[in-house]
Image (cartoon, rainbow, N blue to C red):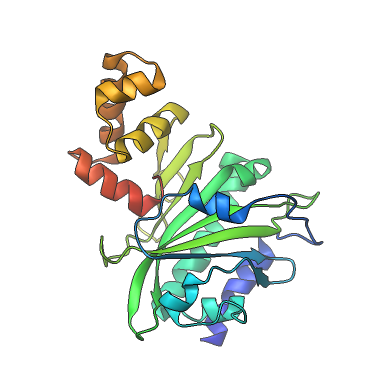
Amino acid sequence: MKMDVDKLFATWKSNQIAIKDTDLGEINIDELVSSIFSAGPTYYYVIDFYTMTLSHVSSTIKDIHGVDPDTVTFSDILNLIHPEDVDFVSKTEQKAAEMFDNIIGRDKLIKYKFNFCIRFKVHTGEYKLFLHQSLVLTLDEHGGFGKSLNIHTDISHLTTVNNYKVSFVGLLGEPSYTNIQIYEGNDSTTNYTSYSKREIEVLKLIGEGLTNSEISKRLHIALDTAKNHRRNILDKAGVKNTAQLIKKSILEGLI
């Protein structure tokens, strides 16, 4: 699948990766990963797009893919992608560049988590559906992305069908944009769901199993306000109940 992987590298190079090395600083990777909800077997690594090398590779990658965390390369991981999903990954990376250049703002790259689903080959030789979550950790002075934390979670127990959509989850109070269609036949520029900072806070508490009364107390808001937020979130998500909302939110990387 070398030609397909080369296509991915070409996509990244055309979308303003860092042109010089960037310093990771005092970021605690383990602490950062632990703050992100994972609904299944998970591994992570940091990719340096300037050198295309890996660091901070978690030991669980061996359990999931059967590869050595000390010697695995970025190309090794990319070659585990299902051949039919490589084009999708390339298009999502291009969509990310368009979103940050035209809608969100490239200066906010480090304030977003970038999510989509993808099929990877596991150690048994079969392909399973994973949730890919990516956080840009460093930028160079030109706004080029340097190092990124990638988290891969096996979600095949939730679904085996890829929706071929991408989501941008706002951190530090930024709005979120979810369910962006990638392939033809859909308006991938404007067809997204946007959640406010408060809605994301409520959504995460719903994911923790809190009732409307408990949410109102936790966020110091009126009970009716908590109820309205839940109702609005259900409407935006296009689901009928909390169980559907939680499953959909996990698949989108919102909780």
Quadrant of residue 88 in the image?
bottom left
- Which residue is depicted at the point 31% across and 17% down? 225
Rendering coords of residue 239 (x, y %): 22, 41
**Depth check, front residue: 73 or 62:** 62
- Which residue is depicted at the point 37% across and 15% down? 221
Res 6 visible:
no
Q: In this view, does 6 lie above or below 92?
A: below
Quadrant of residue 56 in the image?
bottom right
**Depth check, front residue: 231 or 87:** 231
Q: Is residue 167 above or below residue 58?
A: above
Res 134 visible:
yes
Q: In which quarter of the image is the C terminus?
A: top left
Rendering coords of residue 96 (x, y %): 55, 54
- Which residue is depicted at the point 51% across and 86% down? 1
Rendering coords of residue 168 (x, y %): 49, 47
> In screen coordinates, is 223 left or right of 165?
left
Q: In this view, does 6 lie above or below 114?
A: below
> In screen coordinates, is 70 left or right of 132?
right
**Depth check, front residue: 135 or 9:** 135
Quadrant of residue 41 in the image?
bottom left
Q: Give the residue furthest to the left.
A: 240
Q: In this view, does 5 lie above or below 16?
A: below
Rendering coords of residue 46 (x, y %): 62, 63
How many numbered discs? Answer: 0
